[in-house]
Image: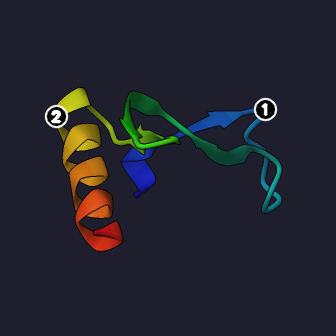
Amino acid sequence: MKDARECHGLLMQTAHAATCLEAKYYDYMILGNLILLCPGDAIDVARENCDLLIDQLN
């Protein structure tokens, strides 16, 4: 999910010069005692991603 990542650091010629591993979490859901952080490039995408994950858990 390239668009759901935020890069930090300097973009240099070498690989891994910038850290692009931080996900953007636009929403969260609580399922029992579980808090799901929902990544996505917009809130509707984030909610859809959490809905898909919840479907897999049930």
| Residue 32 % position (x, y) | 42, 43
Q: In this rendering, is residue 9 above or below 22?
A: above
- Whether pointer 1 and pointer 2 mark residues with C-beta atoms closer than 8 Å, the reply is no
Element class at badge 1: loop
Q: Residue at x 29, y 40 (%)?
A: 46
Examine the image and state in which quarter residue 44 appears.
top left
Q: Is residue 38 left or right of residue 12?
A: left
Q: Is residue 44 left or right of residue 25?
A: left
| Residue 22 % position (x, y) | 64, 41
Which residue is at the front of the view, 35 or 21?
A: 35
Element class at badge 2: helix
| Residue 18 % position (x, y) | 76, 44
Of the residues tagged 1 and 2, which is closer to the observer? 2
Q: Residue at x 30, y 72 (%)?
A: 56
Q: Earlier in the sequence, mark 1 or mark 2?
A: 1
Q: Which mark is residue 9?
A: 1
Q: Residue at x 74, y 45 (%)?
A: 19
Q: Pointer 2: what residue?
A: 44
Colour scheme used in the picture?
A: rainbow
Q: In this rendering, is residue 27 above or below 13?
A: above
Q: In this rendering, is residue 53 above or below 24?
A: below
Quadrant in the picture for the C terminus: bottom left
Q: Residue at x 32, y 61 (%)?
A: 53
Tag 1: residue type? Answer: Gly
Which residue is at the front of the view, 30 or 42?
A: 30
Tag 2: residue type? Answer: Asp
> Which residue occupies the extreme front position in the image?
32
